[in-house]
Amino acid sequence: MLCAFIAGGVPRLLPAARTGSSAQHGAQCSRRPRTPTVLCSATPSVSPACVVARDSLLSSIRGTGRGVESPAETTAAVMEAIDTLVDACAGHQGDDGGDWVNRLAGRWRLLFSTETGLTALMGGRLPLVSAADVYQLVENGGALKNVVEFSRTSTADSTPVRSADSPNPAPAGSLIVSVEAVPNAAAAPVRRMDFVFRRTGVRWGATGGFDLPFAVGRGHFDVLHLDEALRVDRDANGWVNVYAYDGPATRCTVGG
């Protein structure tokens, strides 16, 4: 059984199971919205060494603020923990007939990143807002969206907006980068997804939004580790992202 990891908090065990539908996935523990969490699920035939390595990685990224507050020595320790995880779990990450592509589908919440542009964005470089949720939505068929949700920074003249059914502040807006991704069979046994940037947009409120004119380029990312609750990727620039599975994907579009 995997642990539920709350970033900056303490791992705890949960008997939740990952399923393919939103209704089935609904049997989860209660949690505060927009809190980085790994929802636990059973993983068959995982070796004790793999479990230890996974827990060690989660411990190493605790308190790093998703990589924003990670000095060089801490980042080096995280990278070492990732290498150990990949080696320890190699026997459970082999050829699965391409099923790993289907298992990417869902919402993946960011726990840690070495991507400098992303960490700068999460580090409060924008006035009046701060990064809240940071996640990736992967849908079957190759649609992939990277989303950064922003909350309003408290000021004397502003009050957080609250939704009707939640005591938590609604996001002030989102930055959404959309790509089309396909598996690269020629890269096997490396689990590689090639992608093309399609759209970069900004959204605010219920209906406001616009596209930005720099959705260009292409790249790839390699899936270093993938299980029912944790995923580790490395992209073409060598940047590493660690994600927690956070439920089925929901559609996220600019302007609605």
Image (cartoon, rainbow, N blue to C red):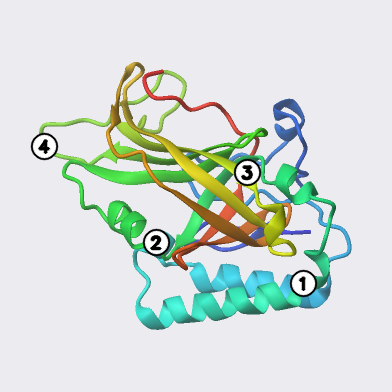
Number of numbered tags placed on the structure image = 4
**CA separation, marks 1 and 2?**
25 Å
Give how far across and how far down residue 77 sits, in percent: 50, 81
Q: Is residue 109 left or right of residue 126?
A: right
Label number found at residue 211: none
In this orientation, which residue lies closer to the viewer: 45 or 14? 45
Amino acid beneath label 4? Ala
Q: Given the current orientation, which residue lies at the most extreme left position?
A: 157
Q: Are marks 4 and 3 in contact (CB under 8 Å)?
A: no
- Which badge, 3 or 1, comes first in the chain's sequence? 1
Label number found at residue 182: 3
**Vertical side of 73 occupied by 249: above or below:** above
Residue identifier under label 4: 156
Amino acid beneath label 2? Glu
Residue identifier under label 1: 90
Q: Quarter-wise, where is residue 75 in the image?
A: bottom left
Amino acid beneath label 3? Val
Give how far across and how far down residue 87 sits, in percent: 71, 78
Task: Give the foreground label among 3 and 1.
Answer: 3
Task: Give the foreground label among 4 and 3.
Answer: 3
Q: Secondary structure at mark 4?
A: loop
Q: Secondary structure at mark 2?
A: loop
Q: Secondary structure at mark 1?
A: helix
- Which badge, 1 or 2, comes first in the chain's sequence? 1
In this orientation, which residue lies closer to the viewer: 179 or 65? 179
Residue identifier under label 2: 115
Residue under the image location 75 percent in, 51 percent down: 100
Q: Is residue 169 left or right of residue 89?
A: left
Q: Given the current orientation, which residue lies at the most extreme front position?
A: 186
